[in-house]
Amino acid sequence: MLWVRVGAIFMFAAVGLGAFGAHALRQRLSPEMLAIFETGVRYHVYHALGLFAVAWVADKNPESWAPAAGWAFTVGIVVFSGSLYLLSITGVRWLGAITPLGGVAFLAGWILLFLAAGR
């Protein structure tokens, strides 16, 4: 049930951040920076939902690669979405350089989940 809890926490955070972006940031950020923030939220939601798939596969086959997929999604959310949130709010452009590392973690998570489902 670890991955259900992690997924639920990340979904809670994504909904809160989405609301924050829609209400508090709309007047404060440029359209470009708001779009960057919204991209972070979108991928945050996708991969928080992916954690529920991880939970299901891990429950069916605890000896699979599912936990590794869960950790990859977790790292991806923190690095990919987190860097976009910080970039959009602070305007510090070098943060965009670490965003692809989170994207690689997302890709690794999906490959690991594929492998986990095949066992």
Image (cartoon, rainbow, N blue to C red):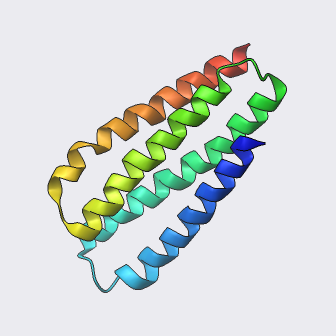
Asked if residue 56 is positioned above or below residue 47 in the image, the reply reads above
- The picture places residue 59, in percent across and down from the top left corner, at 81, 31
Location of residue 14 by image quarter: bottom right
Residue 30 visible here: yes
Asked if residue 38 is positioned above or below residue 21 in the image, the reply reads above
The residue depicted at 53 percent of the width and 42 percent of the height is 74
Residue 18 placement, left or right of 117: left
- The picture places residue 64, in percent across and down from the top left corner, at 71, 19
- The picture places residue 22, in percent across and down from the top left corner, at 44, 78
Residue 93 placement, left or right of 9: left
The residue depicted at 32 percent of the width and 70 percent of the height is 34
Location of residue 66 by image quarter: top right
The residue depicted at 72 percent of the width and 42 percent of the height is 2
Q: Where the C terminus falls, by quadrant?
A: top right
- The picture places residue 92, in percent across and down from the top left corner, at 17, 61
Residue 36 visible here: no
Q: Where the N terminus falls, by quadrant?
A: top right
Location of residue 70 by image quarter: top right
Asked if residue 62 is positioned above or below residue 77 in the image, the reply reads above
